[in-house]
Structures are given as C-alpha cells and as structure tokens.
Amino acid sequence: MDDADDTRILRDIPSLADLPPWQFEAVAELAEPLKLKKGSRLIERGSDDGFTYFLTAGKVSLLGADGSSLVVDADAESVRSPLANLRPRIVDVTTLGRARAIRVPDILLNLPLCDDLFTNADKNPREDGTQEGRREIAARLPFELYRAIRNNKSSMLPSLPDTAVRIQLAIDEDLSDAEAVARLVETDPAMAAKLMMAANSALYGGQAPVHTCTAAVVRLGLQVTRQMVLTFALKEVFRTKNKLLRLRMKQLWEHSVNIAATSFVLARATGGVNPGEALLAGLVHDVGAIVVINYAERYPELVSDQSSLERAILCMRAELTATILREWKFAPAVVLAARDAELWQRAQSGAVDFTDILIVAQVHERLRMNDTGDIPQVDAIPAFAKVLGEDATPDKSLAILNQSQMLVDEMRSVLRR
C-alpha cells in the first residue's frame, strides 16, 4: 500500500497503533486500499471473506435483514472502527457516493497476540543468541506465511483429493442419484471400502450388511455419503514429508478425530444440529495448523524447538483454518465454528450452533487430557448451558458421553480407518 494517507489512517487503528515498526510495515504492505464507485457493494450480508474493512472516505449505508438502515460517514471516529465486523455479516454495506476503504486480512489483526506470545513467553534474560534468533523467526513467521499464501495460494494451502471434490459437487448440485454417486466413489477403491465399512457400522448399519457401494450410498443417503467422503478424504491432508514433524501431524489428526467424534455424539444428544456436519466441523477445526507445520519445514530452528512451533500454531491456527475452509467452500457457519472453537467466553443468542458444539467438545478433550490451564469453569462457559441446559455441570456432560461411549468409540474407529 503506497498511499501516505492510507498509511496514516492505519496508524490510527487501535489494534495496530502499538506494533513495532517492522510489523507495521508488513501490515501496511499487505493491506489493500479500495476505491469504490457510488452504489458499490462493499460487504454482503451473510458473508465472511476473511477481511476487516475500514471506511476512509465517503459514506456507506448499512442495511439489515429487517430493513433497518444506518449511514456511516468516514469521520475521524468511524475510520478507527471496522465496518460490519460481526461474522457472518449481518448487514449489506453499500456506498452512497464515491468512497474509499482499506481492507486488512483478519490474520494480520491478530499480530498483538502473536507478538505477546513470541516476545514475552518464557523469556529468559540469560538466553543465548540461538534462542533469541529462534524467537525472532517465530515472530516473523505469520507475516512470511501470509505473504507466501497471497502470492501462491494453490501451492501453500492444502487441497482435498479430486474424488472427494467431484462427489461433493455432484451431490451438492443435485446432479446424481445413488448409483451415479457410487460409480464416482468406486473410482477410489480405498474410499469405497471405507464407505461400505461406515454403512455397516453400528452408527448407520441395518439388520443386514451391505455388500456393494451403491447399497452403502442408499443406506447412508446422499448427504451422509457426502459427509463421510469428505471425512475420509481429510486424512490424506494431514501429511508432512518432514520426519521430525510427522509425530506432531499425527497428534493433530488424533486430536481432530477425538473432537469430531465427541461433536457427533453431542449433536445427536442435543438435537438441532446435524451430527454429520458437526463431525466434519470437528475434523476440520484445526486444519490451519497443517499449513503452519508444513511451512515450518523451511525453518530448522522452529522444527527443533517445540515451544516456538506451538506458539506459531496457536497464533495462526484459527484464521488459517477459516481461510482454508473458505477455499474448500464450507458453509459460513462451519467456517465460523472452526475459527471460534476456543473462544471459551463466546456468547451467542439463538439456537445451539456448530460453534457451541465445538467449544463443548474442546473442553471435554482438555478434561480428558488433563490440560485445563486456560479454560474457565464450566458454569462460566456459555456454550455449556446452551448445549446441555441451564443445569449443565461437568458431571452431566460426562454422563452424556459415558452413555454414548459406544458411539464415540465406533465413530473414532470409522474415522481412523
């Protein structure tokens, strides 16, 4: 971004004001100025594109679904605040004349958190030059990684196997019946075998076993077939060529499987949330960590230092996950759930959603692993009351999972095949 006025406006944004010079320069480089004509749609209701918008000149109209409207003028105060920043967006934002705006990638607005993690954690006044250098590399990683993604998205972000993409498109666009979908599945024999195993499992099985892929698709139904195909395909994404990082990737997959299985059972017990979609949301909630792990191969200093690598993952996981899921065309509600899966204090009115399910599943997994250091008490986590009722307690929550232990174990078994 070359315009001096836009750079000055960026310096007035509170979340960026205290960044050290090199970080601010990186944000200024990667932020995008927008020049808009009258009547341009800047933000669309229901969208979540991974950017935060700041109006820098002109006026815009914010129109809600109920017809309510608000005009925002680019005065000194409004410039400092993001436009329509709830996700997914709840208003349409349209220019009322010529206008200018700046959009900043959400991942870069997390920089103060990243800086705290990398510069303050475990800092030792007597650390040697190697430790200090490693810390600096980790602090710069978010900028370097985002720049690499922007310049070459196709090679930086993981992609789903072609078979899974074709099946997903055929089902989502309502172009195929069970037999046609089965023919697509059979182009990948391993996928077909896994789908038949799932159809014969305790989760979906009937009285008689199925022996053909078409029968498996009929038993599961097209939408569950779509969910299971994506589920099985995802395991191929959790790969790394680096031997030192292979264990971390395996741990990531196991964690995702546990969250997915628990999310499936919680959704079944709660009602109102599709269990298959909840399972998928659990399985993909950490895919952003894959990008960090694979990119870290370029920095042997990080590969050899587990704590720095974990800070990089913690810093970037949420927004990178959202970026990947948008590329994979996941529904905005699933993108939001994966991004906000560790916002323990998140309070949302309305019915139980995927985010609530994921938060509760995450807490269960932390309890199982005896890793509860940064988690509030259950009665202070709004998602628990929404998912389990106002009388939610750890005991009630564990009782539901214990009663469903067979389903949890079966789902884990299906996912690990």
Image: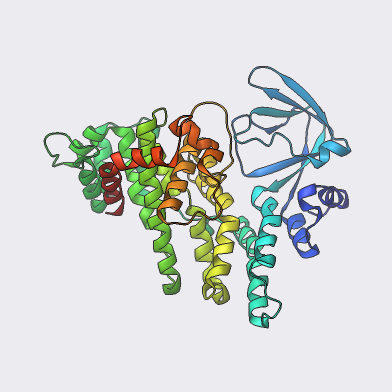
Against 217, is 152 above or below? below
Q: Quadrant of residue 220?
A: top left
Q: From the viewer's perspective, is 11 left or right of 273?
A: right
Figure label count: 0
Q: Quadrant of residue 350?
A: top right
Residue 367 placement (x, y as % from top left): 44, 51
Against 348, is 374 above or below? below
The front one of 53 and 302 is 302
Q: Residue at x 64, y 17 (%)?
A: 66
Residue 58 placement (x, y as % from top left): 84, 33
The front one of 160 and 389 is 389
State the quadrant of the C terminus. bottom left
**Color encoding of the figure:** rainbow
Residue 284 placement (x, y as % from top left): 45, 48
Q: Residue at x 43, y 42 (%)?
A: 394
**Can the viewer see residue 279 in this picture?**
no
Q: From the viewer's perspective, is 146 left or right of 354?
A: right
Q: Residue at x 69, y 43 (%)?
A: 52
Q: Residue at x 56, y 72 (%)?
A: 302
Residue farthest to the left? 208
The front one of 98 and 87 is 87
Q: From the viewer's perspective, is 1 left or right of 288?
A: right
Q: From the viewer's perspective, is 124 left or right of 327?
A: right
The front one of 58 and 79 is 79
Residue 161 placement (x, y as % from top left): 38, 52
**Can the viewer see residue 192 in this picture?**
yes
